[in-house]
Structures are given as structure tokens and as C-alpha cells.
Image: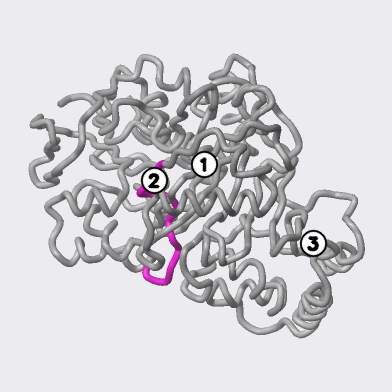
Amino acid sequence: MDKIVILGAGLAGISASFHLRHARCVLFEKNHYPGGHIHTEFLDGFTWDEGPHISFTKHQYVRELFEANVDGEYLEYPVETGNYFQGHWIPHPAQSNLHAVPEPLRHRCLQDFLDMRQSAAGSPPETYEDWLKFAFGDTFATTFPSAYTRKYWTTDAENLSTDWVGERMFFPSVEDVTRGAVAPLPQQTHYIKNIRYPARGGYMAYANKLVEAANVEFNHELVHVSFEDRALFFANGSRISFSKLVNTLPLPVLIQLSDAPPDVQAAATRLSCSSLLVVNVAANHPTVRPENWIYVYDEDKYTTRINCTELLSPNNAPEGTTGIQVEVYFSKYKPATESPERIASKVCSELVEMGLIKSPEAIMSVHTKMVPWANVIFDHDRRAALDQVLDWLSQKGLRREDDDLEPITDWERKLADPLGDEHQSVFLAGRYAQWKYYWTDDCVLRGLYLSQTLKG
């Protein structure tokens, strides 16, 4: 096939096709709809995204592109985030809002934090657990982020590296923590200050025009890729040859379905990723809390993170109702031991206990969705395993990039110096294909970057 072949019509694939020009590309998608993780569902008057998608990008190009995709009909407002801990509501980030932490825990958190800052010295932390204790002190680290790590990242903090942290975690000043232990700070210390969200249509609306005129072949599930013969085989029996391939499928899937040798196959299995059970609960009363999303630290609860769809946009739910979305995470480190239905039932009870649903009788409907690929887990196996996989792909047409093992991309530097290679035939795009800590703006910018490397 002369056209550039793109595997997957999620945001990374759509962006690649849009920026390369749709006429040059054809996308193969296993689902009957585009969007991947930004796909939006509409049920009984409620709008449900696949998790709390919001845009807070600082990249002006992405801001303007998203704005154009919704014809300027978006909402922009200050973010409000909260934490739930054993019946207490704590503003976010909790480390600079210790005034809401109950005593004597508050005093221990503050004292450990101050002791750590006074004694901090030596080499940089090697594990995420070390980083948390270095940043917050033992008591706070153990009680809050370490507990949340086991729920969200599905493994202990000591099993994670620190190269993914970047600006994703707030490193507080002594002044902020000290003042925040007495009373609320006058300024927001969370790295997300304002968010944008489409007025209508859910988060998928941000890709409305990106996907227009795209050549998408739906219901094409990949079953084998031969890099040797440059051919793709699909479950519906079709066979497609390629000269240029952009892959957005999860890297372990691509390798396991390929003609890669056993040692490379084994390396791909060491790339760890969580899965997500989304529990969507509709209730017949208005939203109880003002937060856009809530982190739940209690390890006796399945509920990990919460958002209410009508707080993203009032058009996302019928007036006078609330649509509460709960995230529950699993992985090889933390496998599910109960059915989705049983977990959803327990989540509903937890929401009632937290006061987010007024009573069991207020629940109008519950539905779940299992998302097999959620968050790349930055464990200590990741870098070596990824390096081995990318090295093998480099023998099959991939050009290694100087930051391809880094979880986060410096787009200002990257876009200023695109490195094209006329002999390159295999390209990777997106969180799972590149095995990075990507957000939606990263996926958009990767498509832009590919258009600069695949000129023509």
C-alpha cells in the first residue's frame, strides 16, 4: 500500500493522519468508532468520558487546535481538586493543606517534613518511595501518596523509578507547608490552575475536526504483523502491505503479534501497564461536592479517583442530577479478585458512605467499562525492557530517538529540531506505542512532529 498505514484511530493516530494529511494516510481501527481513550459515550442524557479528561495544556498550538475543533464553544474555569481521607475532606495538594488533616497526624506530618528538609543531603532518590519521603517526610509520604500509589499505580512506591515525576508531583516549599498547616493558603499550589472542556459532546469533541475526512477502516483487529514482509493481518481476513507504518497500539501488543524473536517477546512482557475499571453512577440529586475531581486515600475502598461529569460541563447531565465516575485500577501487581458487578456494588456503597450519593435509593443507574490499557507503570524493569524492544524495532525500520527511553517529552526542544530519515519505515506515536507518560496534548504534538519528519 502506497499510503502511510496507521494502526489505531485513537487521538495519537488521528493526530498523525491529520498532520500528515488524511489523503496520504489510512487508519486501521479495531473498534467501530474513533477516539480510543477520548471516546465519549452518551447514555440516558448523561455524557461519559473514559475517565476525567480535561485540557490544561500550556502549548498554545494545542489550545488553539482544540478551540477550533469545537468552534470556540468550550468552558474554561479554575480547577478545584479535593482529597478524601478517613471521613475528612482535604484540599489538594494535601501536603500544602495540612490544616485539614486531623490531629495528631497533622503535627507528625509537619514535624517529619521539617526534619527531612533540615537534614536532606546526599545523592538523589533512586526510588519513588525515597522521593516521596525526601519531598514530604516519612509520615505524610506513608499515609498519603504511598497509599495512593498502591491504589492508582497498583504497586508499592519502592517498585517505581523517579524519572517520570517531572512536574507531575508538587514539591512544596517549607513556607507553603508551614503556613498551610495553620490555615488555607491564599494561592493555589496545584500545578493545574485552569482547565478547558468542550461545552457539548464530551472530551471527544476536541477531535471533531481532526477526524473529519480521515480514511479510517473500522472493525480491523490486528492479529499479526510481519516486519520481515512488511505486512499486516487482521481478524476479518484482510492483509495489508505497508511501506511506511505508524503504530499507536500498545507496544507489548505490537511485539507479541509480530515476528519478533523470543527474547524480544519476553522483554515486551516486562513492560507493565495498569487496567482501569470505570464505574459510572447516575443519581437523582444535584452534585454534593464542588471539586472537579477527588483523590481517595483509604485503602479499604476500591474508589481511587472520582469526577462528576456535570462539573465538567452542565450539558453533560440532566438538570438536578449527578453523574459520578469512579476509577478503580488493577495490574499484574494487583489483579482483580472480584467481578466488575461486585466491585461496582461496593463502589456505590463507598459513595454513599462518603456522602457523594445521598442514599442507595437515589441511584438511578450504574454501568461499568473495563479499559485494558490505562497507565504505563514506571517500574524498574521499564527502561531496560523498552530499550531492548526499541533496539529490535530499529533493525526493522525504526529510527531510535535520543529521548525514546524518557517518560516525558520536551516538545519545545523536540519540535525545534525534527530529525527526518528517508529510510525510516516504522514510527511510534502515543502513550502506549512509545511507552511514555503522555497526556492528550502530547499525543497531538506527536502527530505534528511526525508530519515534520515525514515530509512530502
Q: Residue at x 19, y 54 (%)?
A: 256
Density class for disc 3 (Cα within 10 Å; few <14, some 14-19, many ≥20) is many
Helix, strand or loop at mark 2: strand
Q: Residues within 10 Å of mark 1 (few under 14, many from 20)?
A: many
What residue is drawn where x is 83% and y is 69%?
A: 174
Amino acid on which the number 3 mark rests in the picture: Ser
- The disc at residue 371 is 2
State whether the magenta stretch is mostly helix, strand or loop.
Answer: loop
What range is drawn magenta here?
369-381
Q: Which residue is mark 3?
A: 96
Question: Magenta includes 183?
Answer: no
Q: Position of residue 217 (x, y in %)?
A: 24, 24
First reached walking from the N terminus: tag 1 or tag 3: 1
Residue position for label 1: 51
Q: Are marks 1 and 2 in contact (CB under 8 Å)?
A: yes
Circle 1 — which element? Answer: loop
Amino acid type, mark 1: Gly
The residues bearing labels 1 and 2 have C-alpha atoms spaced at a distance of: 10 Å
Q: Is residue 295 left or right of residue 347?
A: right
Q: In the depicted view, which residue is nearer to us: 220 or 420?
A: 220
- Of badges 3 and 2, the one in the foreground is 2
Q: Nearer the viewer, residue 341 or 454?
A: 341
For the residues carrying marks 1 and 3, which lies nearer the camera in this image?
A: 1
